[in-house]
Amino acid sequence: MSWKTEIQLMDLNQSQRLEVTCTVCGHSRYENSYRLVRRYGFGFEYLDEVERLLVCGQQGCLGTVRLALSTEEETEGFVGGLA
């Protein structure tokens, strides 16, 4: 079991961003969960099903994709050094 099999798309916040990455060409894009529900009619599908239904958006690729939840926080680079 995976977290993708336990969460439906409609369970996410409407502003939740999903990172969609192609497993063939590596092209990445961000999709809004609300937009996926409105545009494709997804809503009751679990995230693993959405992952199987989506394809790469790069012209001519149409490869399978991998979904990841995106955080709204900005990540900061590592600051090296010893205290």
Image (cartoon, helix red, strand yellow):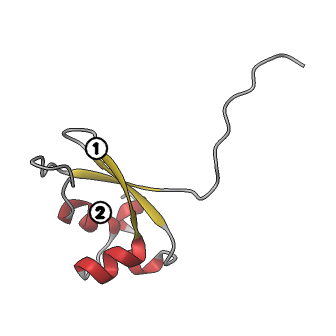
Name the image quarter holding residue 42.
Answer: bottom left
The answer to whether residue 59 is left or right of residue 37 is left
**Does the rendering let one see residue 34?**
yes
Query: Which kind of residue does numbered mark 1 sit on?
Result: His
On-image quarter of the N terminus: bottom left
Q: Which residue is mark 2?
A: 48
- Where's residue 24, x and y in %? 18, 40
Q: Residue furthest right?
A: 83
Q: Secondary structure at mark 1?
A: loop
Query: Which kind of residue does numbered mark 2 sit on?
Result: Asp
Q: Residue at x 12, y 52 (%)?
A: 62
On-image quarter of the C terminus: top right
Q: Residue furthest top?
A: 82
Q: Secondary structure at mark 2?
A: helix
Name the image quarter holding residue 71.
Answer: bottom right
Circle 1 crowding by C-alpha within 10 Å: few under 14, some 14–19, many from 20: some
Q: Residue furthest left?
A: 60
Q: Nearer the viewer, residue 22 or 59?
A: 59
Q: Which residue is mark 1?
A: 27
Position above or below: 42 against 78:
below
Position above or below: 21 against 13:
above
